[in-house]
Amino acid sequence: MSRLGMLAELLPDDADGAIIISNENRRYFTDFVSSLGYLLVTRKDSYLFVDSRYSEAAQKQAENCTVIKFGKLSDDLCDIIKQNDLKNIMLESDAFTLTECAYIEDILDRAGAKAVKSGELNKRINTMRLYKTEDEIQKMHTAQMMTEKALTDTLKLIKEGVSERDIALELEFRMRKLGADGVSFDLIVLAGKKTSMPHGVPDNNRIKNGDFILFDIGADYRGYHSDMTRTYAFGNITAEQKRVYATVKQSQQNALDMVREGVKCGDVDNAARSYIYHAGYEGYFGHSTGHGVGLEIHEVPSVSPNSDFILRNGMVITVEPGIYLPDNFGVRIEDMVVLAKDNYINFASLSKELIIL
């Protein structure tokens, strides 16, 4: 059964249709990429409304739906709703702005239908997207391999005086040369004191002896993302830097050892967090231990403290603890894994030993 067919079956009894507008979910259900479109799902049929910029491509590429080139969306959407006698239509609540919601509600009102504005549609779509197919996993694996190859080659170019920004640009160039469609997010390349900022922005800060260099990077391949963090040393580093690195490395392994079907996300987080705290760094690890990845770089579940979310086979998560000492330095190590029978498969293959460049 197609994904659209599965979604149609998941519609609750009090709804006979759904409208999806986010780029990621339109792509998930139709395998068609566009910056604008309206996907109407009913119990029997699905319709993808696009304008003249995308109509020809959509006719050739969109799967399991009828493509409608709209001149005036309000008229064409209204007509289809009336033809299908739809009365209660769920909206993709996470994607609609207030303006867009009002616009669609006006169309529905003209068609004699009402909008269902709960978060239930998003919950049901997110549940579908949680479980990755072999095709999705393969795309993410390809993205990871591109990421690792680009990083391995870029490390050879690092020398004292090179800027964070130049390294980030080199990484993106190499990923795209390898076939990536883009980067998963604005690449994070930080050196020296800036490594204490978990999501710092690369600038003209230049590499110098004694720095940690933190790479939080990923590639986008056919819509699917990779996500990996490695921290390297440049030149002579201190005993404290080595201790922090070893602490983060072990904390990550502790968390990875917890990753298996049936385990709570909160327990995975605690395995990393408690080790860091007991090592004397309580208060220096502020973010969650991980998150889901797929068509978006941050998806459910959140591997965070007190999360009762239960991990299941087929889910992809990151495991990325860190220690950040303000105005001094920071270390983060991150792998992306997919849960498999009795264990997990790690997408990453690069060493996590402390490497001095």
Image (cartoon, rainbow, N blue to C red):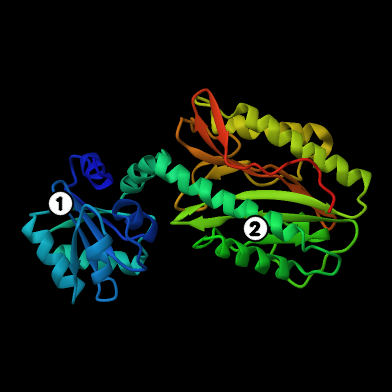
Coordinates of residue 352 in the picture (x, y in percent): 74, 41
Coordinates of residue 354 in the picture (x, y in percent): 81, 43
Residue occupying the point 18% across, 43% down: 14
Residue occupying the point 25% across, 40% down: 10
Up-down relation of residue 235 to residue 141 (above or below):
below
| Residue on which the image places disc 1 | 45
Up-down relation of residue 101 to residue 262 (above or below):
below
SS class of the residue under badge 2? helix
Coordinates of residue 329 in the picture (x, y in percent): 82, 54
The answer, for residue 198, to whether it is visible in the render is no
Give the mark toward the camera: 1 or 2.
2
| Residue on which the image places disc 2 | 150
From the viewer's perspective, tell me whether residue 228 is left or right of residue 74.
Answer: right
Residue occupying the point 45% across, 34% down: 314
- Quadrant location of the C terminus in the rendered image: bottom right
Q: How many neighbours does mark 1 have within 10 angstroms: few (below 14), some (14-19), or many (20 or more)?
A: some
Query: Which residue type carries mark 1?
Result: Asp
Query: Which residue type carries mark 2?
Result: Ala
Answer with the quarter of the image where residue 54 lies. Answer: bottom left
SS class of the residue under badge 1? loop
Asked whether the beta carbons under mark 1 and mark 2 sit within 8 Å of each other, the answer is no
Q: Earlier in the sequence, mark 1 or mark 2?
A: 1
Distance Cα–Cα, label 1 vs label 2: 43 Å
